[in-house]
Every structure is written in structure tokens, then in C-alpha cells.
Image (cartoon, rainbow, N blue to C red):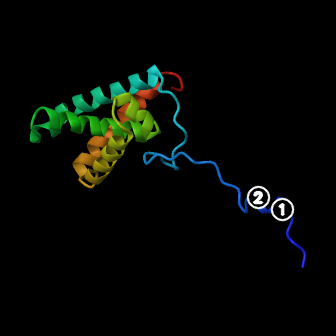
């Protein structure tokens, strides 16, 4: 019986794949994030202001305690509208609002859950239309 070639004994049976970096915040459904432009940040801040003003005008804010909770609610609606109306990735919306991407995801879920209420759905739809109008008025793709 012949003995095996000594050089074949030192060859690994399998090659080792390079390590893959993974983040729990990574979302395969969203394209890679791009740098947030000042114009897009401004659009988000305009949507936030529109949301706050419309909330006051419609009286939706009267059932909420003033302060932190009302501020969070305005921000949640504005984040949702920026994500939906402008098709902004959640990571980009998070940058614009100075929050984490998971906070934007939570905001979107909260707003979606409340849209079963007809009056609330109408309110959010108005904010969406106003945001779209602002985007058109910008006169260029931002």
C-alpha cells in the first residue's frame, strides 16, 4: 500500500470565509444610506413644524398633556411622513431628527397603528399632502 503524499497532509480541507460584519440595525429592505443633505434635513424640519401647527389647529393636541408627550407625538408623525412621503430611508430620517434608526421604526409603527382611527388617518393624510406640496415647491429633486 502506498503512503499519502506528505504535502497533501498540510492542506486544509476547507477554506475559511472572511468574517462578515453585521449590525442588528441593518435592514436588507432598505438601500445603503447616503449622507443626509442640508436640504433634506430642512424638509424634515419643515414637516415637523407643519405637523405641530396642524395638530394645534385641529385640536388633536388638546387631549394630550403638554410637554414631552406632545413633542414626541409630533416628532413621530413627522418622522413617519418623511419616511412615507419622501421615501427617505429610516436611517436618513433618524439623522435628520437626531435620533436612532430604531426610534424611527417605532414611530412608524405607532402612527400606522393609530391610522385605524378615521380622524387620525385624515390628519396624517393632510400632513402627507402638505409635505408633498413642500417638496414640489422646492423646485428640484432633493
For the residues labelled 2 and 1, the Cα–Cα distance comes to: 7 Å
Q: Residue at x 38, y 28 (%)?
A: 96
Q: Please identify the quadrant where the N terminus is shown.
A: bottom right
Q: Position of residue 90 (x, y in %)?
A: 42, 40
Please, is residue 43 above or below residue 103 in the view? Answer: above
Please, is residue 61 above or below residue 108 in the view? Answer: above
3 or 36: which is nearer to us? Answer: 3
Residues at marks 2 and 1 touching, judged by CB atoms closer than 8 Å: yes
140 or 37: which is nearer to us? Answer: 37
Q: Position of residue 82 (x, y in %)?
A: 39, 36
The answer to whether 35 appears left or right of 105 in the picture is right
Q: Residue at x 40, y 34 (%)?
A: 93
Please, is residue 29 above or below residue 67 in the view? Answer: below
Circle 1 SS class: helix
Say which residue label 2 marks.
10
Q: Quadrant of residue 15?
A: bottom right
Q: Quadrant of residue 84?
A: top left
Circle 2 SS class: helix
Say which residue label 1 marks.
6
Please rate how many residues cluster around mark 1, counting C-alpha atoms within 10 Å: few if below 14, some from 14 to 19, many from 20: few
Q: Residue at x 48, y 48 (%)?
A: 27
Amino acid at each position: 500500500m502506498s503512503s499519502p503524499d506528505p504535502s497533501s497532509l498540510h492542506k486544509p480541507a476547507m477554506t475559511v470565509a472572511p468574517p462578515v460584519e453585521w449590525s442588528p440595525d441593518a435592514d436588507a429592505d432598505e438601500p445603503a444610506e447616503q449622507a443626509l443633505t442640508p436640504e433634506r434635513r430642512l424638509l424634515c424640519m419643515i414637516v415637523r413644524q407643519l405637523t405641530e401647527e396642524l395638530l394645534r389647529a385641529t385640536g388633536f393636541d388638546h387631549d394630550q398633556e403638554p410637554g414631552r408627550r406632545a413633542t414626541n407625538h409630533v416628532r413621530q408623525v413627522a418622522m413617519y411622513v418623511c419616511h412615507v412621503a419622501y421615501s427617505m430611508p429610516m436611517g436618513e430620517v433618524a439623522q435628520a431628527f437626531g435620533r436612532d434608526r430604531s426610534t424611527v421604526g417605532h414611530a412608524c409603527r405607532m402612527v400606522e397603528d393609530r391610522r385605524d382611527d378615521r380622524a387620525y388617518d385624515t390628519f396624517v393624510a393632510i400632513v402627507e399632502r402638505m409635505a408633498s406640496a413642500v417638496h414640489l415647491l422646492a423646485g428640484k429633486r432633493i
